[in-house]
Amino acid sequence: MGATQKGLGAQKQGVWNMLPALDSLLWPIFFLGGGRKNYQQGRWLQCGLGLSKGTWDIITTSISITAIIVVLFVSWAWRWRVFRGWLVPIPNLNGKWEGTIRFKDNGEDRTRKVSVDIKQTILSIVVRFKSKESTSLSLCGSFNIDEKRGIKQLIYSYQNDPDANIRETSPVHYGTTKLDIGSDNKSLIGEYWTSRKTKGTIVLKKK
């Protein structure tokens, strides 16, 4: 990935980088509020830190509120449109998807209907893939986004578990999927390849 590309790893770092900024913002707010009065009264904690009770209250309150804000943001607030682009560069793909895969079986072209369930936070993404004969679950995933080159992709590795009654001819295997994300984030088109030396194409639409 190029220097301008952004994935979940970079997004994680961005979330943690928010903490000092939030603390810097909250500290003066609480100091100018009730914490300032306690600070001026000079009531010192007997903890060997040399901090007044008011100062200590400001620190603990600031940390608590920062933690609450981060948890809320990571869980669901990151999906808000107001954060798109400048703070959250990754698309929201949460939800149910359906479509088809195309592949070759003994030299013949085959098409199979599939359903996909994507569960995503700002720090992680899980893709559950189901067809008539097997299910697969992502092991790891990331986004490949390069705005300058017009690239917006989801890439993930997975484990595929065929149904027990066909496992002798179709054993458990691993693979990788690369999907181009549509401009409206409601279509996924791409390809996959597996440890069995097979490959195919995928077309998905959000339900």
Image (tube, rainbow, N blue to C red):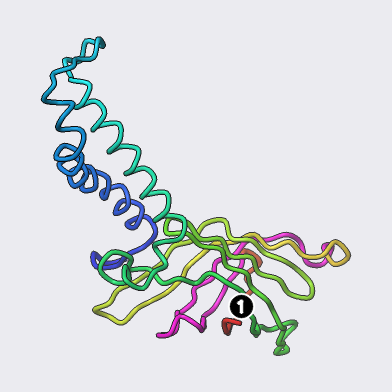
Position above or below: 171 against 181 = above
Q: Residue at coordinates 58% horizontally, 82% vertically from top-left? A: 204
Badge 1 amino acid: Trp
Q: Which residue is mark 1?
A: 97
Position above or below: 57 against 168 = above
- Start-end of magenta stretch: 167-194
Q: Residue at coordinates 42% horizontally, 74% vertically from top-left? A: 153
Of 154 and 62, the residue lying toward us:
62
User: Any magenta on residue 202?
Assistant: no
Q: Quadrant of the C terminus?
A: bottom right
Indicate the quadrant where residue 146 lies: bottom left
Expressed as whole percent of the image width and height from the top left, the position of residue 121 reads: 47, 59
Of 61 and 171, the residue lying toward us:
61
Of 82 and 207, the residue lying toward us:
82
SS at circle 1 = strand
Q: Residue at coordinates 57% horizontally, 81% vertically from top-left? A: 206
Position above or below: 200 against 135 = below
Q: Quadrant of the N terminus?
A: bottom left
Expressed as whole percent of the image width and height from the top left, the position of residue 112 reads: 72, 83
What secondary structure characterizes most of the magenta part?
Answer: strand
User: Any magenta on residue 168?
Assistant: yes
Expressed as whole percent of the image width and height from the top left, the position of residue 58 reads: 23, 33
